[in-house]
Amino acid sequence: MLHTLKKYLFLFLLFLNINKIYAVDNPYIFIDSNAQDMVEVLTSNSNLFESDREAYENKIKEIFEPMIDFRRVSASVMGKKYYLLATKEQRVEFIEIFKDSLLDTYAETLAQWGDSTISTEVPKDESLSKKFESFEKNIEVKQILNTGTSKYPISYKLRKTDNGWKIVNIIINGVNLGLTFRNQFQALAISHNESIELTLRNWVSDAGDAGIS
């Protein structure tokens, strides 16, 4: 009897582990599961938004931060010209500056979504297996954000890394955030005579309402 219980327990744990690995390797589950966690935070902590904004936004950051490849995104925002002009130390510094400003911007934007729902567009099994089980390093995952009064398309550009899938760009309702931030960096650099130091010192990421109102 004990031997049988141990066998069932082993099979159960193996099943859980397989599902966990599948979720990590599956970009659609990766995006959808984190999005639903985000919705849970938004809906179950609405009172916290008014009483302790920082604590509320930190709950969002805990979910959102591990999803993004900040090294790649920050390099893209700087653009090839300014990335090559920057020292190694300045590149590392901008990763942290950009991370903080982007997470602050996103947390504040997400906090205003209220009782929204998010649905992920998952392709049919055959198409799905061809996409993420192949050697492709890049993939696009689409979602629909429903605020109750309006629906907004969200497109995530993901890249496969050694640590699983990571977001490298987001397009919300037609607003390409990566391109928006890159244009901001370029304009800021030009206004400071292309001084990387002054550009980093004065950087503030701003995507407005990201096309959501």
Image (cartoon, helix red, strand yellow):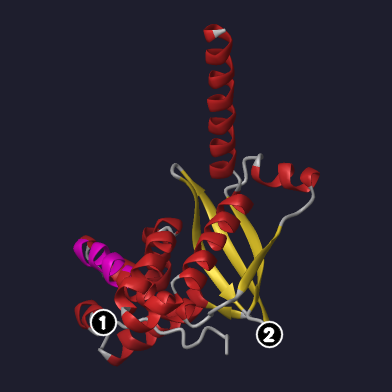
Q: Is residue 114 left or right of residue 199?
A: right
Q: Is residue 13 left or right of residue 58?
A: right
Q: Crowding at label 1, few (<14), some or many (≥20) Cα neighbours within 10 Å? A: many
Query: In the rendering, at what x and y percent does residue 71 appear?
Result: 36, 59
Residue plotted at (50% across, 60% down):
167
Q: Crowding at label 2, few (<14), some or many (≥20) Cα neighbours within 10 Å? A: few
Query: In the rendering, at what x and y percent does residue 10 appear?
Result: 53, 19
Residue type highlighted by circle 2: Ser
Residue situated in front as seen by the camera: 79 or 124 = 124
Q: Is residue 58 left or right of residue 1?
A: left
In this figure, which residue is indicated by the disc labeled 1?
199
Residue type highlighted by circle 1: Thr
In this figure, which residue is indicated by the disc labeled 2?
150
What kind of element bears circle 2?
loop
Q: Which residues are magenta?
A: 89-99
Residue situated in front as seen by the camera: 160 or 17 = 17
Residue 52, quarter of the rendered image: bottom left
Residue plotted at (76% across, 54% down):
123
